[in-house]
Image: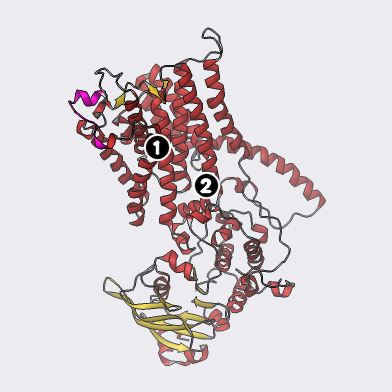
Amino acid sequence: MTASMPPAPAPPKERRAASVLLEAGGQATLPPLSRRRARPLWEIWAVFGICLVVGVVVPLLNVVPAETSALHLSEFFVSLIGKLTCYGIVAVAMDLAWGYAGILSLCHGLFFALGGYAMGMYLMRAIGTEGNYRSTLPDFMVFLDWKELPWYWHGFEHFGFAALMVVLVPGAIAYLFGFFAFRSRISGVYFSIVTQALTYAAMLLFFRNATGFGGNNGLTDFKRIIGYSLREPSTKAALCAISGLALGLTYLLARAVVGSRAGRVLTAMRDVEAKVRFCGYDPVAYKLFVWTLSAVLCGIAGALYVPQVGIINPSEMQPSNSVEIAIWVAVGGRGTLAGAILGAFLVNGAKSWLTATFPTAWLFVLGGLFVLVTLLLPGGVVDIFAALARARGNVARGIRGAQSKAVAPAPSAAPAGPVGEEPRP
Amino acid sequence: MNALLEVEKVTVRFDGFRALDDLTLSLEAGELRCIVGPNGAGKTTLMDVITGKTRPTSGTVRFDGRDLTRLAEHTIVGLGIGRKFQRPTVFPNHTVYENLELTTHGSKRVSRTLFAHLSTDERLAIERTLELTGLTDYRDRIAGLLSHGQKQWLEIGMLLVQRPQLLLVDEPVAGMTQQEIERTEEILVSLAGKHTVVVVEHDMDFVRSIATTVTVLHEGRVLAEGSMQEVQNDPRVVEVYLGA
């Protein structure tokens, strides 16, 4: 584009010619940048509120008030909230891939678990010689009569190395798997089924003792993290606060991606992949990008989750876990980031409550919830908010419309109106 | 002679059926060419081969000297070939403005589009396109809600902001009113010269009014080529296609 071209005068006659249009340069009056879909300000505030509660209020209410105080929150509650927050991060990651880019992954539980295992390996090494067998090796290795640390455990005694692996391992696996799947143009249900097979295969692998990750018991009995005892309430409160911060950052990152031109390419690709190709974009690159990013976010969530719940084992890789992640997002609202977070909190909150009070009812409730939401709120729970906002908007517009009609004849073309606020099909 | 696009001895076989049969065709820079032919003559297949959607069984397609037959679709677009599909295809959940933004001429790499902002130049091009296609008032409308004709216009607009050297336009006036057809004519004619335009069309009146050169395809081969008048008077063409 030659910005240095002489300014092209744009008299009405010439403006009709397409060749003028295609010429670069010119200094015709430029209207302000087109009004995009209204920025979801309420969404940003809602998520900010959640993060504030999780990151500041809950930890403080655990640490500051005396245990007898009515304001005191129990440790159990703090870890529960911390856990839900980690699920919230996973939901955002899932929504990026599924809601915005149309890639229904049924192996996000695997990426979550891989991040968790990487953190778990660090926590195992951090136990030192305080294990049951007083050995420098993790307990399960002593139990299996192993004499030395397998090669792939080296380095995990350093927190920094483990943190790197939390990001690298899920990212690399997602990238490799995605590269072959997307390049072969595997999409839709076929992709979902293959991902499910992937997490199932990984689960079988991790169940084996010989794999070296503690078999079906997984990794547990953690003592401390970077020097802080995991039994201390303050450590738990801090982990909860960090989770809240991580959720906030994840949200901001996801919002930035979705709001960029690349984000619009992703959504365009979800809707009409062939056309995206004919606009000059390589769908493989875009899918790989969002898919790998999503996997990395899941890994981080898993790494935050493990020290808070104190265990990681292969059951996290069950295909049903990954399906549940999709349910959170569907219930909350696909294609709205706040909806995904809301869904994760709602479904998992209900799960912790119901599995404690009516353990047998949980799966029925989950199934019923999924059916009901699909039937009544196809856009998820956020549809309720959207409908409320629309109702209010319609009232306001109705009044304005009546006024403008009284003043002047209605303009021929109505601008976007209410439909413009609803991005989903 | 300065050939921009050279299709040489291209054959495309689908299960024994020859959609294109040893087809040779050459286009000069700045030309406006119409391709006509009865159903199944291979018009759309030819477009598919040029844009990389279909790989030819044999033969080469050269654009500006480069062989296209091994390149991916998005790479071919990057070289400067734009295509408008037969059925209007727009991004239904994006606004008209966003649809145009996505096709602007610029880097299409993820690392760029993540941080891309519209330059003044690009915004100007979008504004002019909106005006040209009569979509200025609909700039913030979700494209899925446009009428059929408006979608056609939007797609043409998307092609224009892409600034391709070669435009392949598949049935641009299908489903348009007479008035819209005339506007389309105007645009396509004004594009020729600076850009090379290939139009596939069934509407013979439309072809008559815009074309300088017409290529008639029949059963995957070039049956005749020349001005509309020459072609119309060719007995073979009359036999297979024009009839009246």
Question: Measuring 64% from the left and 57% from the top, which residue is drawn there?
Answer: B139
Residue bearing mark 1 = A299
Q: Kindly give the residue lying farthest to the right in the view shown.
A: A407
Residue bearing mark 2 = A257
Q: Residue A213 lies in what quarter of the image?
A: top left
Q: Give the percent coordinates (x, y) of residue A104.
A: 40, 45
Instruction: Using a 10 Å C-alpha cutoff, classify the residue at mark 1 as few (fewer than 14 neighbours), some (14 to 19) or many (20 or more).
Output: many
Q: What residue type is labelled 1?
A: Gly
Quick check: is A150 in the magenta stretch? yes
Q: Give the percent coordinates (x, y) of residue A232.
A: 44, 16
Mark closer to the observer (1, 2): 1
Q: Kindly give the residue lying farthest to the top in the view shown.
A: A68
Instruction: Using a 10 Å C-alpha cutoff, classify the residue at mark 2 as few (fewer than 14 neighbours), some (14 to 19) or many (20 or more).
Output: some
Question: Measuring 43% from the left and 70% from the top, which residue is drawn there?
Answer: B51
Instruction: Give the vertical position of B228 relative to A136 (above or below).
Output: below
Magenta span of residues: A139-151
Disc sitting over residue B175 in the figure: none
- Label 2: state its secondary structure: helix
Q: Kindly give the residue lying farthest to the left in the view shown.
A: A145
Q: Which of A98 and A391 is in front in this view?
A: A98
